[in-house]
Amino acid sequence: MGKKTPELNTSSTADMAFLLLCFFLMTTTMDQDLGLQRRLPPMPDPNQKVEDQKVNRRNIIIVKINSADRLLAGTEPMHVSQLKDKIKEFLTNPADDASLPEKEEIQIEGYGPCYVSKGVISLQNDRGTSYQAYIAVQNELVKAVNELRDEWAMSNFGKTYLNCDEDQQAIVRKAVPQNISEAEPKDVSKK
Amino acid sequence: MSKFKQKEKREVPQPPSGSLSDIVFMLLFFFMVTTTMRETENKVMVKLPEASEVAKLERKDLTSYINIGTPIRSLQAQYGNDSRIQLNDSFKTVDEIRDFIAAERDAMSEADRSFMTVAIKADETTRMGIVSDVKQELRKCSALKIMYTARRPAEE
């Protein structure tokens, strides 16, 4: 019988692993990126003739932010905190007001016919608007749509939008669309 | 009487440390897998604006970052304290965004290109003028999926 092979000394592996561990602990970044997702409109084709899109006046609400971060929604100046209710009223049009957007009956796959608002929110800002105010307004707009989606999902599926499964979420998204258009940059301060 | 004879000094036995390295290795692998190395050094100061309706960014690997803000202290002597755009590791002008987007797009696989997102990390005091310029430029190179990076407001 040959000699027994000596046991490997493993007491220092823990130290080495600790060193490596410390290195990864230091360099790791666990922060998630959070934010508001948007889709920009594609650039208009320069060859195409610009024809005025005939959007009915009642179907559009113009939200303007000027260089002093003041807010104008539709025709009335307001504070950011009032914007959400204004947008919700605009998008739901509960009393079928003639000055608020019309609704269109569309077929949603997997659900059936549904009345969907044709309202579009047009957001315009000045070059001097601060980013903070801009995001605050964007946030209010998203909040209004999210709340409407929650309400719709609650009354139709009995749970909030986030708790719905993917198919249901797709239905809710179609029933309560998020139509926010970020217009071409304009100088709001003039005129 | 021999029952009570075990009165000699007894030492507390050494706790077994053989599995210690296994535990540490497990932790190590966890961090190795979850880690993403910080690729770029921030050259602009960015304090993100607050927004409560933020959503999580899904594919970090398909995201390009555009930082907008005032240069950090040590660079202010050189670049001034006007808002500037940082792409990768250096200050760029609005016109250079096009090349940046093209380069980022080339680095992605064919199938992923349509999912490319551009995250705009702008300081909350930035004026919208520069952000609008960036947005227009992104539209021109049809990188239409964007995200305004924000942070959740602190709990009240």
Image (tube, coloured by chain):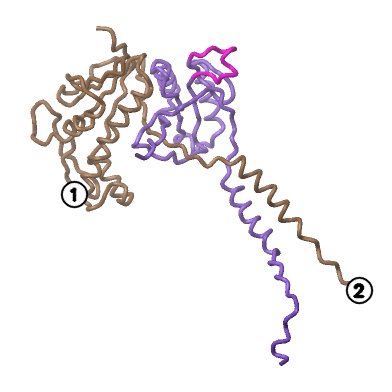
Image x and y of residue B136, in percent: 40, 19
- Give the residue pinned by disc 2: A2
Q: Are marks 2 and 1 on the same chain?
A: yes
* Amino acid tagged 2: Gly
Residue at 58 percent across and 41 percent down: it is A28
Q: Residue furthest top?
A: A191
- From the image, which quarter does the N terminus of chain B lie in? bottom right
Question: In which image quadrant can residue A40 be found?
Answer: top left
Q: Amino acid at mark 1?
A: Ser
**Mark 2 or 1, nearer chain start:** 2
Q: Is residue A166 left or right of residue B97?
A: left
Q: Are marks 2 and 1 in contact (CB under 8 Å)?
A: no
Kindly identify the residue that appears in the image at 35 percent across and 27 percent down.
Answer: A135
Q: Bounds of the magenta span?
A: B70-82
- Mark 2, secondary structure of its residue: loop
Residue drawn where x is 51% and y is 25% of the image? B101
Q: Chain of mark 2?
A: A
Give how far across and how far down residue B72 sits, in percent.
55, 21
Residue A121 place in picture, x, y as percent? 24, 27
- Residue extending furthest toward the bottom: B1
Label 1 packing within 10 angstroms: few (<14), some (14-19), many (20+):
few
User: What residue sits right under mark 1 in the picture?
Assistant: A155
